[in-house]
Amino acid sequence: NLSMIIRGSAAILFIYDITNKKSLDDFNQSYQYIKLNKFDYIQIFLIGNKLNKDDKKQITKEELQLFLKEKSEHVYYLGEISNSDCKK
């Protein structure tokens, strides 16, 4: 249950897969749940991953910009990362 996971949280970090449009759709469902249930105090951060698989990208920059424009007052977009951005 999402409400049990986010209750008392100050922020949520969502990571979506740029090669899987469903992952952004899943974020949207969670976002709608958060807004519907008045968790407005929670800061929402969104990060795209698998940047190194740009040739398999299913979400265009234009789609993402439109998506974020609709949620601009509630979602902070932190950009996209690839495995090479992460240190072991």
Image (cartoon, rainbow, N blue to C red):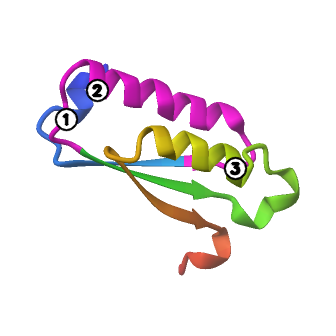
The mark found on residue 67 in the picture is none
* Residue 11 higher or lower than 39, as above or below: below
Q: Earlier in the sequence, mark 1 or mark 3?
A: 1
Q: Magenta stretch: give its range.
A: 16-42
Label 1 with label 2: CB-CB less than 8 Å: yes
Mark 2 residue element: helix
Which residue is the extreme one toward the bottom? 87
- Disc 3/disc 2 C-alpha distance (Å): 24 Å
Residue type marked 2? Lys
Residue ID for mark 1: 40
Residue type marked 3? Glu
Mark 3 residue element: helix
Which residue is the extreme one toward the left? 8
Mark 1 residue element: loop
Which residue: 85% across, 51% down?
56
Residue type marked 1? Asp
Residue 20 x %, y %: 72, 40
The front one of 64 and 27 is 64
Which residue: 65% across, 70% down?
83
Q: Please tell me how crowded label 3 is: few (under 14), some (14-19), or many (20+) other residues with Cα within 10 Å.
A: few
* Residue 48 higher or lower than 27, as above or below: below
Query: Does residue 8 appear left or right of residue 26 in this picture?
Result: left
Residue 61 x %, y %: 69, 54
- Disc 1/disc 3 C-alpha distance (Å): 26 Å
The mark found on residue 62 in the picture is 3
Residue ID for mark 2: 35
